[in-house]
Amino acid sequence: MQVQVNGEAMERPDGETLAALLAALGASSGRVAVMLNDDVIPAAERAARRLAAGDRVEILTFAGGG
C-alpha cells in the first residue's frame, strides 16, 4: 500500500503498524512524535495502530539545544 511519510510517497506492507514503520525507518520510538492524518499518536498506541492506504504520517524528531 502507499502512504505518505514526511511528505514523501512510500510503499509499505498492508496493515503495517506505526511501530513497525518506525522500526523500519530506524526512528527511535522514545525520541519522536508521530502524527497520523493530523492526529498525534501516543507511543503507547503505536504498536496497535495499523496504517491504511493513503494515510499521511509525520515523524518529528526532538533535538536538544539551548
Image (cartoon, grey):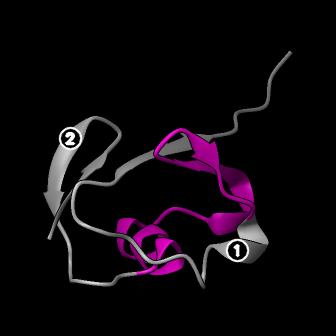
Name the residue tied to disc 1: 45
> Bounds of the magenta span?
17-42
Give me the disc on residue 8: 2
* Residue 50 percent location from the top left of the image: 45, 78
User: Pointer 1: residues within 10 angstroms few (<14), some, or many (20+)?
Assistant: few
* Residue 4 percent location from the top left of the image: 26, 47
Q: CA distance from mark 2 to mark 1?
A: 23 Å
* Residue 39 drawn above or below residue 11: above
The front one of 25 and 33 is 33
- Residue name at image x 75 percent, y 61 percent: 42
Q: What amino acid type should be assigned to the residue bearing mark 2? A: Glu
Secondary element under disc 2, as helix, strand or loop, is strand
| Residue furthest top in the image | 66
Secondary element under disc 1, as helix, strand or loop, is helix
Numbered disc in front, either 2 or 1: 1
> In terms of sequence position, does the residue under pointer 2 or pointer 1 come before the other?
2
Quadrant into which the C terminus falls: top right
Q: Which of the 4 image quadrants contains residue 10? A: bottom left
